[in-house]
Amino acid sequence: MISTKDTVERYFEGYGEYKCERLVDFLESLKLPTSITKQKGVLMAFVTQGEMEVGAGYERYLAREGNLLIIQPNKPFFLGSHTTDVDGYVLLLKGDGVLGSMGNHSLIFNLEFLETWSDSLFHLEHLPTEFIENIFKRIKWEKDAEGSKLSVVNAYVITLLLEVNQFYNESALSNRASIDITRKFKMEVYNNLNKNLSITEFADRLAVSPNHLNKAVKSVTGESASQLAHKIKMVEAKYRLMMPASNIAEIASELGFSDASYFSRFFKKNASLSPKEYQNTIDLS
């Protein structure tokens, strides 16, 4: 049984404007797997050795040496198992915290890869591992030092994010049109979780035909637009069902279903469990 008591959010309670820790210390403080949770800020983890399992949004990742994991604000995620030799660094930033200390962080937090619908695992092949590791080391050193300088931390974080942004944009060049459509489609799904829109309605919002939308999404994700939309909605449904005092009928309404029975059929088709059966696997106390 998964307990909602063991969330990453509890680990970071009262951390101030930012927190940077060794990845091994962070993972050892948690009971794994953690329950599904969301962060208001940005959670970044850089793996320097070993492997760790992560669920972020509708994806499941195995983060390995040299991988940078970015959990965007309000994206449901959980941490799974890891190898005994795993290590690296973890950094949590508040949107109104360290990045705002120099007066204008709106540019940084408008970067597309920090949006909820973006991918969370990055393979930064164009940068040596030592480059990324040194940024995290420097941020941790500032965090541990007396009279730490937020302006210094800010500069290192901005450097890291701009490097990721360059990689993010370059990686899309080979299939730009389909990737752009897929990104916009995911954005529409996340922004309309309270509605039960059809693929035709999504296509109309994106000014493309349903067939073109499906082909674009299929070429990027390997799944149809409908399959992807259902995955995204299922992750949100599971997150809400894990909340204490959650009500299935209310969740159904919040996710755009006309009634609880329709939501239950949708959930069971995609999870092989009814919403109530899923709740029974969770310790909501």
Image (tube, rainbow, N blue to C red):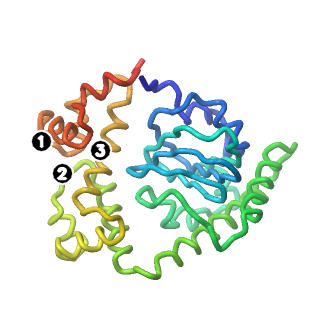
Q: In which quarter of the image is the N terminus?
A: top left
Q: Is residue 151 visible?
A: no
Instruction: From the top left corner, tell me how far across and down residue 187 is, in percent.
Output: 35, 62
User: Is residue 220 in sight in this rendering?
Assistant: yes
Q: Distance between the residues labelled 2 and 1?
A: 9 Å
Q: Which of marks 2 and 1 is nearer the N terminus?
A: 2
Residue neighbourhood size for the residue with mark 3, other residues' Cα within 10 Å, grouped as few (<14), some (14–19), many (≥20): some
- On residue 196, which mark appears? 2
Give the alpha-carbon distance from disc 2 to disc 3, as whole Å: 12 Å
Where does residue 134 sit, x and y in percent of width and height? 78, 59
The reply, left or right, for residue 141 in relation to residue 188 is right
Q: Which of marks 2 and 3 is nearer the N terminus?
A: 2
Per the image, label 3 sits on a secondary structure element best described as helix
Dot 1 crowding, Cα within 10 Å, few <14, some 14–19, many 20+: some
Mark 1 lies on residue? 258
Residue contact at pointers 2 and 1, CB within 8 angstroms: yes
| Label 2 SS | loop
At 31% from the left edge and 22% from the top edge, which residue is drawn?
280
Give percent across and percent down for residue 214: 23, 69
| Callout 1–callout 3 Cβ contact below 8 Å | no
Quadrant of the image containing the C terminus: top left
Could you tell me which residue is drawn at 56 percent across and 62 percent down?
122
Decide which of 147, 51 is in the foreground and name it.
Answer: 51
Under mark 1, the amino acid is Ser
Which residue was labeled with disc 3? 234
Q: Which residue is drawn at 51% across and 45% down?
A: 54
Compared with 144, 206 (above or below) is below
Residue at the image point whose x is 66% and y is 61% from the top: 103
Q: What residue type is labelled 2?
A: Asn
- Discs 2/3, front: 3
Disc 1 and disc 3: Cα gap in Å? 16 Å
- Identify the residue at the far top of this view: 285
